Image (spheres, grey):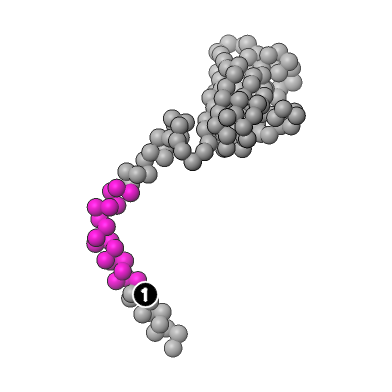
Amino acid sequence: MRRAPALACVAIAAALGLAACGGGGDNNNDTTAAATPANTATSGGGGGGGGSTVNISTPSGTDLAYDQKDVSAKSGSVTIDFQNNESIPHDVAVEDSSGQELGATDLVASGSSTATVDLQPGTYTFFCTVPGHREAGMEGTLTVK
Ligand SMILES: [Cu+2]
């Protein structure tokens, strides 16, 4: 007795599914196209839904410095996209105004690493956690609006 109702449901679902598939063939293309802007927003950094990407890099050579001194982001999920062009290992950590570290990228040499931190509007500091590097100048200001 358990099977009969279940089969009936499957039959109805199949009928509905076939109807939806038959009538929705053209719409499926629209759905695919609509999903594309989401990817574009990621690379462009201007998409809705919160979140933005901050690009931080080091100059090639051996300077203990970042290319950026002041960067900004939108509040929400902020991705730090760090490109280390030096063979010296560096990372990018973010701390709030009270000095609490909120997140950091991996330590990388001649490579890139990303980290995502959830940030409220305010002023934060980004810096390299390798001993001595921050003191040498590897820090900057991250302003979140
Ligand atoms: Cu460093």
Q: Nearer the viewer, residue 122 or 117?
A: 122
Image quarter (top left, top right, bottom left or bottom right) of the N terminus: bottom left
Is 144 included in the stretch rendered in magenta? no
Front-most of residues 110 and 73: 73
Q: Which residues are magenta?
A: 13-31
**Residue 21 picture location, percent across and down:** 28, 61
Q: Is residue 129 left or right of residue 20?
A: right
- Residue drawn at (40%, 82%) of the image: 5
Q: Is residue 22 magenta?
A: yes
Image quadrant of residue 116? top right
The amino acid type found where label 1 is placed reads Val
Q: Where 12 falls versus 125 (above or below)?
A: below
Toward the bottom, the furthest residue is 1
* Magenta span: chief secondary structure: helix
Dividing the picture into quadrants, the one containing residue 119 is top right
Q: Is residue 28 left or right of residue 71?
A: left
Q: Residue at x 66, y 17 (%)?
A: 138
| Residue pictured at 66% horizontal, 26% vertical | 124
Residue 8 x %, y %: 36, 80
Does residue 59 lie above or below 80 as drawn?
above
Q: Secondary structure at mark 1?
A: helix
Q: At 55% from the left edge and 31% from the top edge, which residue is drawn?
A: 74
Q: Which residue is mark 1?
A: 10
